[in-house]
Amino acid sequence: MKILILFFSFVLAYNVEALDNGLAQRPPMGWMSWQRFRCLIDCNLYPDDCISDTLFRQMADRMSEDGYLEAGYEYLIIDDCWLAMERDEQGKLQPDPFRFPYGMKNLSDYVHSKGLKFGMYEDIGTRTCAGYPGIQGYLEIDANTFAEWDVDYIKIDGCNAEQSEYEQGYTDFGMFLNNTGRPIVYSCSWPAYLETGGTPANYPYLAKICNLWRNWADIQDSYNSMTTIADWFAKNQDRFITSAGPGNWNDPDMLLIGNFGLSTEQEKSQMALWAIMAAPLLMSVDFRTIDQQSKDILLNKDVIAINQDELGLQGRRFKRRDEDVDIWIREIAPIVNGEYSHAVAFQSRREDGAPRAMQIFLSEIGLNNPFGYFVTDLFEPTNFKRVVNRTEEVLVRVKPSGVVFLKLVPQAN
């Protein structure tokens, strides 16, 4: 009898900890409202940009009709500020009645009718970061509410909670999501609040309970913010790369592409680094006003293919060369004669006016296939498309704050 009791205790403990939804086998792709639209709730002053039913239906239309869904961007995710300031009489979450007059299930149905999946935001604490009701004390009822609304993705932020409450709160909410029976991708912001305060997160445990997790600080609409996050990931990569893979991903935050802060070359840099890091590709842009260059970067099928590579191995910063160019490398498919293919990004950190010329042997970056590699430039396809021997010196010219992004496939003979 004692053995039987111990067995059931083990099963119960495992069920509490384990995320068993089979989702996010590749980094999630979609759109999230926060970076571009923040917490604009004044629909009189900002009728086209306020957090409202109208805005999300318009974004859903554009995602479905302008090629984003076809490219793989499938989640439309509402961030903070969708809520009413109080729960309803039954203690359930409710949307702001003026900005979301038809309710969230109706909006969810509309998003699904466009072929998209529907994502939402909440917070593990008593209040969201913007001051709306959080899920603390209501974990089960809120998980059931999201399932009733046919939510496909949920981001749980970490404001207004004690750090000592995170492990139990995030674990329990994941369990309640599983218990609903609805497949819901679970994004946790828990480590971002620990790491920015100097406390290392337990990434192996996070991989048991979350599909993805925000590792560090919020991204802002600037190249400095983007590169600061990339530098932090590079500095700390050995602590969390092994926890990433199909079903579990490190999240450096949203794509800035198409907004105000990045040049075209800097947008290419972010897209390449996020692809190398196997990061979720979550756009946050106004599809009604995006320019064609930015759209082309977001829809680059070859770069997306690197991000979505079937092996699910997160890449890393290999080294910094001459203190002004970072080299990032990711192992990808296909595997030829036991040799991985690779994606390699040469990212310039220079600000001078001329492209930086770099001459490098493939063997310098650990690529030693004796039969060489077929090399393709993913942003400038006419630059390469030829076989390069491991002992052949390769010349790349990297534009200031830009990137050269190569795919190298080993040759069989």
Image (tube, rainbow, N blue to C red):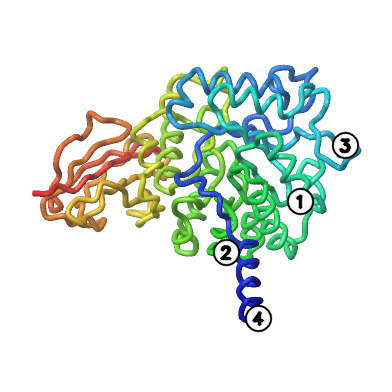
Q: Give the residue type at disc 2.
A: Tyr
Return the disc, 4 or 1, that comes first in the chain's sequence: 4
Alpha-carbon neighbours of circle 3 within 10 Å: few (<14), some, or many (≥20)?
few
Give coordinates of residue 384: x percent, y percent. 20, 35
Alpha-carbon neighbours of circle 4 within 10 Å: few (<14), some, or many (≥20)?
few
Q: Work out whether residue 378 can be spotted.
A: yes
Circle 4/circle 2 CB separation < 8 Å: no
Q: The residue tagged with tag 3: helix, strand or loop?
A: loop
Residue 139's disc is: 1
What residue does disc 2 label? Answer: 205
Q: The residue tagged with tag 2: helix, strand or loop?
A: helix
Return the disc, 4 or 2, that comes first in the chain's sequence: 4
Viewer-proximal residue among 51 and 344: 51
| Residue with the most extreme right position | 89
Return the disc, 4 or 3, that comes first in the chain's sequence: 4
What residue does disc 4 label? Answer: 1
Foreground mark, 4 or 2, reads: 4
